[in-house]
Amino acid sequence: MTQAQGFGRRYIKAFFKGFFVAVPVTVTFLDRVACVARVEGASMQPSLNPGGRQASDVVLLNHWSIRNYDVQRGDIVSLVPFELR
């Protein structure tokens, strides 16, 4: 019984160590490098979301290019509004 409790404690300890490393790395990656977004509606038809309101496309937003000012003609730029608190 004590051996099973020791295994459970080690498992939980390893889980929390991995969790506290993975969450900051993931948040930093999504903030600085790239994130995934869904395109809905007819505003970008026919390039994105050709099916209209019934379907939606999933795109990868590249934050890295914007930070390095590597935007070229023909690129699609997404503006995300934010609130000042």
Image (cartoon, helix red, strand yellow):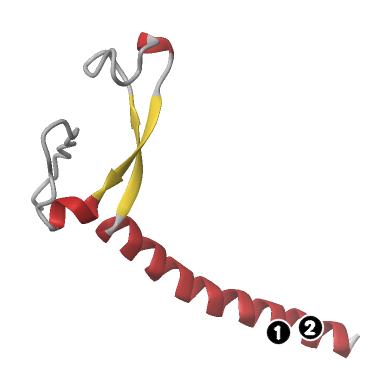
Find the residue positioned furthest to the front: 73
- Residue 45: x and y in percent read 27, 14
**Closer-to-camera residue (8/56):** 56
- Residue 29: x and y in percent read 34, 61
Tell me the quarter of the picture where residue 43 sits: top left
Q: Is residue 47 above or below residue 2?
A: above
Decide: marks 2, 1 in contact (CB < 8 A)? yes
Q: Describe the element under mark 1 as helix, strand or loop.
A: helix
- Residue 74: x and y in percent read 16, 30
Q: Describe the element under mark 2 as helix, strand or loop.
A: helix
- Residue 47: x and y in percent read 28, 19
**Closer-to-camera residue (9/14):** 14
**Closer-to-camera residue (3/20):** 20
- Neighbour tally class for label 2: few under 14, some 14-19, many 20 plus, Cα within 10 Å: few
26 left or right, relative to 3: left
The residue pinned by badge 2 equals 7
Q: Residue 53 carries which label?
A: none
Question: How far is disc 2 from disc 1 in space, using C-alphas?
Answer: 5 Å
**Closer-to-camera residue (39/74):** 74
Tell me the quarter of the picture where residue 17 sits: bottom right
72 left or right, relative to 28: left
Q: Is residue 37 above or below residue 28?
A: above
85 left or right, relative to 48: left
Q: Kindly identify the residue that appears in the image at 78 percent across and 88 percent down.
A: 6
The residue type indicated by label 2 comes to: Phe
Tell me the quarter of the picture where residue 44 sits: top left
The residue type indicated by label 1 comes to: Arg
The residue pinned by badge 1 equals 10
- Neighbour tally class for label 1: few under 14, some 14-19, many 20 plus, Cα within 10 Å: few
Q: Kindly identify the residue that appears in the image at 55 percent across and 75 percent down.
A: 18
